[in-house]
């Protein structure tokens, strides 16, 4: 590796990307805009191994691409299924500037983007956060949401009660008042904000269980055959997305009801850029149920990578 190319570790990424600073940077990035094509996906073996490419650029300024591999049989080899690396390039010359741990970058920017959306869509007085799912994203989603709202209680639900307990304990160790809940409907009855990060293929959050005024943040179900919400919820809520291009192509929560005809396209009000630029006002009343569906955009990766690089440099 050339001495001029900096490798930035996961620990350095997490240390450099505090949520207030990253959320502000993402707000500015969505205002400024960037070229961020929907990710390309390639099958590399008959066993289902895939390579994903997520490029983004601002001409003459910043350029980067995230390389993601998904190898489903990796757990049998004792290694994770998903791996990622971010390549940050000089926008003027195209020369490489840094290689950045892609998993840490993704965890941070995903959580920060949801928190940014929450500043427009959740009620300011929101006090109870329900975290649905106990995977790698869960603690980051909780921390980011707590950075923008005065959350007093974090409630954690997962299919495994033991993992829900350990996730809540980990959040407590980070200074949050967190507790597990054994029944999802009981958690929904308390929640002002629900953040859901799972790989579910069946709806978990149903419209009839959600209180008026709740904000729903859906960051899992990132393929067309996955779902975290039912038709009743997406039809009852005011629906927002990170990007129209990505969500309407990949998000099963929206693609499935659109294809069935149970959701009208005009029910999807705005994308995140519309909120930050003031083209959509976001939440319009305390009783409104809002739903933010994200599948990720390379603009967020580029913004986070540049912030990490500038801080470490």
Image: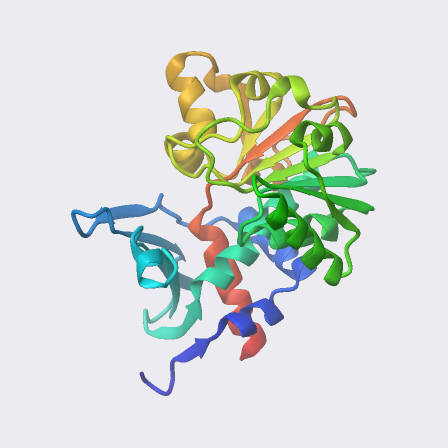
Residue 43 image point, x, y percent = 21, 47
Residue 272 falls in image quadrant: top right
Q: Point out residue 246 in the picture as x, y percentages from the top left corner.
A: 41, 38
Nearer the observer, 78 or 217:
78
In the orientation shown, which residue stands out farthest toward the top?
Answer: 261
Task: Locate the N terminus and report the quarter of the image it occupies.
Answer: bottom left
Q: Position of residue 300 (x, y in %)?
A: 50, 53
Horizontal side of 209 relative to 239 (left or right) equals right
Q: Is residue 174 visible?
A: no
Q: Which residue is located at x 41 percent, y 30 percent?
A: 248
Front in this rendered view, residue 48 or 163: 163
At x 50%, y 40%, the residue is: 220
For residue 286, what is the image quadrant?
top right
Indicate the position of residue 40 as horizontal and vertical percent values.
29, 47
x 62%, y 17%: residue? 236
**79 lies above or below 260:** below
Q: Does residue 81 appear left or right of residue 228 in this picture?
A: left
- Is residue 226 depicted above or below 289 in this figure? below
Compared to 279, does 119 lie above or below?
below
Residue that sits furthest to the left in the current view: 46
Residue at 53% x, 19% y is: 267
Among the 4 quarters of the image, the one containing residue 173 = bottom right
In the foreground, 172 or 36? 172
Question: Does the image show residue 63?
Answer: yes
């Amino acid at each position: 590796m050339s001495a001029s190319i900096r490798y930035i570790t996961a620990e350095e990424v997490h240390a450099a990307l505090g949520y207030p600073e990253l959320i502000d940077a993402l707000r500015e990035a969505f205002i400024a805009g960037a070229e961020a094509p929907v990710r390309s996906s390639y099958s590399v073996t008959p066993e289902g191994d895939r390579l994903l490419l997520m490029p983004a650029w601002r001409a003459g300024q910043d350029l980067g691409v995230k390389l993601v591999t998904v190898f489903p049989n990796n757990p049998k080899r004792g290694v994770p299924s998903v791996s990622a690396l971010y390549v940050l390039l000089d926008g003027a010359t195209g020369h490489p500037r840094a290689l950045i741990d892609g998993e840490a970058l993704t965890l941070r920017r995903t959580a920060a983007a949801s928190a940014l959306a929450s500043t427009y869509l959740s009620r300011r007085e929101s006090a109870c956060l329900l975290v649905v799912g106990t995977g790698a994203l869960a603690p980051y989603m909780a921390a980011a949401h707590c950075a923008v709202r005065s959350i007093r209680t974090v409630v954690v639900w997962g299919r495994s009660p033991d993992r829900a307990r350990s996730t809540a304990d980990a959040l407590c160790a980070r200074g949050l008042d967190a507790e597990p809940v054994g029944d999802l409907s009981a958690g929904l009855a308390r929640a002002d904000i629900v953040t859901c990060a799972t790989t579910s293929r069946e709806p978990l959050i149903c419209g009839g269980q959600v209180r008026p005024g709740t904000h729903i943040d859906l960051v899992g179900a990132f393929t067309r055959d996955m779902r975290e919400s039912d038709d009743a919820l997406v039809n009852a809520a005011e629906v927002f997305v990170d990007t129209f291009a990505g969500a309407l192509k990949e998000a099963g929560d929206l693609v499935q009801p659109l294809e069935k005809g149970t959701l009208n396209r005009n029910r999807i009000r705005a994308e995140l850029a519309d909120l930050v630029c003031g083209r959509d006002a976001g939440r319009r009343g305390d009783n409104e149920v809002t739903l933010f569906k994200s599948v990720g955009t390379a603009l967020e990766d580029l913004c986070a990578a540049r912030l990490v690089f500038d801080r470490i440099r």
